[in-house]
Image (cartoon, helix red, strand yellow):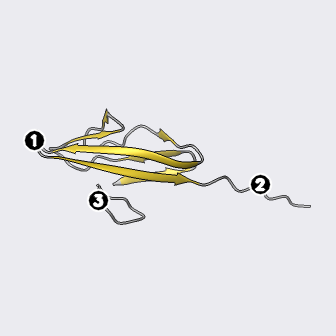
């Protein structure tokens, strides 16, 4: 998996507005996003984002069941821009 905007590992797919999704790309590993299993190659359910910082935890366990890696992702959602007013 990779963070698309930062080119890091693991793929956090989309972040549009108030939701964020992650896609499990490790075929034989177990991937959990905020403690919810995300099967390969399915996207996680939408993760709601509040304005400001949001912590998302991704745990990956290797096929051997022993090797584990935890990623802490801080997603910052800005405030919405005010609607444009046309005279």
Determine the image quadrant of residue 59. top left
Sequence-first disc among 3 and 2:
3
Q: Is residue 8 above or below residue 71?
A: below
Query: As drawn, is 4 to the left or to the right of 77?
Result: left
Q: Is residue 7 above or below residue 51?
A: below
Whether the residues at callouts 1 and 2 have beta carbons within 8 Å, the answer is no
Establish if 32 lies above or below 1.
above
Q: Determine which residue is flagged by label 3.
A: 9
Q: CA distance from mark 1 to mark 3?
A: 20 Å
Q: Residues within 10 Å of mark 2 (few under 14, many from 20)?
A: few
Residue where numbered disc 2 is placed:
83
Dot placed on the residue nearer the N-terminal end, 1 or 3: 3
Query: What kind of element bears circle 1?
Result: loop
Identify the element where label 2 is drawn: loop
Which disc, if any, is residue 75?
none
The N terminus is located in which quarter? Answer: bottom left
Residue in front for this viewpoint, 26 or 77? 77
Q: In front: mark 1 or mark 2?
A: 1
Dot 1, how many residues are within 10 Å of its Cα: few (below 14), some (14-19), or many (20+)?
few
Residue 66, numbered label = 1
Tell me: 57 left or right of 84.
Answer: left
* Pointer 1 or 2: first along the chain: 1
Q: Secondary structure at mark 3?
A: loop
């Amino acid at each position: 998996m990779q963070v698309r905007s930062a080119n890091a590992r693991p793929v956090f797919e989309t972040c549009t507005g108030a939701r964020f999704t992650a896609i499990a790309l490790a075929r034989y590993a177990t991937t959990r996003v905020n403690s919810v299993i995300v099967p390969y190659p399915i996207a996680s359910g939408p993760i709601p984002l509040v304005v400001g910082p949001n912590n998302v935890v991704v745990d990956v366990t290797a096929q051997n069941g022993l090797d584990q890696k935890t990623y802490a992702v801080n997603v910052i959602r800005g405030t919405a821009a005010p609607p444009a007013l046309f005279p």
